Amino acid sequence: MAEIVAAALTSHAPLITGRPDIARPEQRDRLYAGFREVARRIAAARPDLLVMFVNDHIQSFPYSNMPAFCVGLADAYDAPSAGASRLMQIAPRKIRGAPDWSLALLECGLAGGVDFAYSYELETWDELAVPLHFLLPDGRLPIAPVYTNCGAPPLPTPARCRDVGAFVGAFVRSRPGTERVALLATGGISHWVGTPETGRINPEWDHRVLDDVARGDVDRLAGLTWEEIERDGGNGGQEIRNWIALLGAVPGWKGEVLAYEPVAEWITGCATVWVRP
Amino acid sequence: MGAPVIRTSYRLNKVLTAIARQHRMAATLTDEDLAGHALSDEERAALKTGDTTRLYQLGANPYLIRRVFRSRFSL
């Protein structure tokens, strides 16, 4: 039987790799160490595939066509593209997709009540490139991204994200064969981007989220409203939908916080979390 | 501050998306940038002065505000 052999949650922000020089060295080094530890554990789990819960930043999806959930069917993904590479200060590269696996997920969803959109070409930003810079240094593991609208409200509810994640988890485990699947969700925690409060971080809220993750209390997170998240975690905090989806995929699993740093210079409450039974 | 509210201006987001897709960043936009876009006077003024707070209040998506008007942000 296919199985989930690893799961992790991390933040993503272009400045994490783009401007290492402006962060306080001790904060930067602790966060980077957290990323490296997640990388080590993922490699040790020997996965065949990395399923990623991520979000667009109004790069791929315009306001004329905005999916709530979208399965990537591309053969490969920019991580990063040449344009994003300049800001993120990491070399452009492509990471292989898993279009057959993703198509099977899409078809299973459409047959089973989760009406995913799909895309054969996604313009990616930091949601893949920044965490994968640390986590897949050789870029050899194929990825299967599932995009959730976290940036163009109205957004799917956190409860729906949990349920879609649960569907993905059940799909992973239902596959014939001996596939070893790692799950990764990127985004959050609190940050205000492009709003009048740009640069604000709310460590108190971040710790509350991390405490819920540590307890495996996905239902408390799934009960949050858009308004509560926007008020306490900012528009960037809405990205915890990706974390909630992953936690939905592994019921009962709990988080081990490897690093948490509210890095003012990167305008983001940054974390890396390992999730396990 | 009251509770956050969702306010979306499709007109603003359409023009900001068009400019972002040209991989352009600017401190202000010009009449040429805005040619062919249906905008209210208030929206047009906010775009032409690069007033990021007003754009947000008028319903521009903050990710698009940041991409186009990046130079307006100190961080």
Image (cartoon, coloured by chain):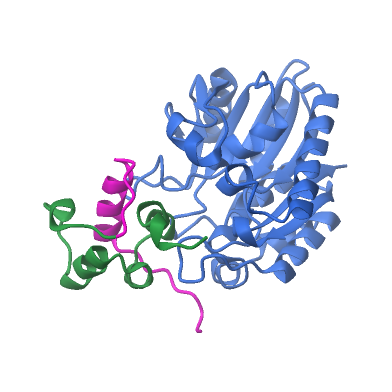
Chain colours: A blue, B green
Q: Is A71 in front, or is B52?
A: B52
Taking the image as shown, residue A59 lies to the left or right of residue A246, namely left
Q: Position of residue A105 (x, y in %)?
A: 58, 29
Q: Is A88 in front, or is A250?
A: A88
In the rendered view, tell whether residue A44 sits above or below residue B5. Answer: above
Q: Position of residue A246 (x, y in %)?
A: 69, 44
In the rendered view, tell whether residue B73 sits above or below residue A65. Answer: below
Q: Who's the residue at 39% across and 43% down the image?
A: A61
Q: Answer whether residue A35 is magenta in the image.
A: no
In the rendered view, tell whether residue A65 sits above or below residue A178. Answer: below
- Quarter of image, res A38: top right
Answer whether residue A117 is visible to the viewer in this image. Answer: no
Q: Is B72 in front, or is A214?
A: B72
Q: How many marks?
A: 0
Residue farthest to the top, as pictured: A177
Residue farthest to the bottom, as pictured: B1
Answer whether residue A59 is visible to the viewer in this image. Answer: yes
- Quadrant of the rendering where the N terminus of chain A is positioned: top right
Taking the image as shown, residue A82 lies to the left or right of residue A231, namely left
Q: Who's the residue at 72% across and 56% down the image?
A: A24
Q: Position of residue A92 (x, y in %)?
A: 52, 27
Residue farthest to the front, as pictured: A21
In the rendered view, tell whether residue B5 sits above or below residue B47. Answer: below
- Quadrant of the rendering where the C terminus of chain A is positioned: top right
Taking the image as shown, residue A26 lies to the left or right of residue B3, namely right
Taking the image as shown, residue A192 lies to the left or right of residue A256, namely left
Q: Who's the residue at 42% across and 69% down the image?
A: B6
Magenta part of the protein: which range? B1-27
Q: Is A182 in front, or is B49?
A: B49
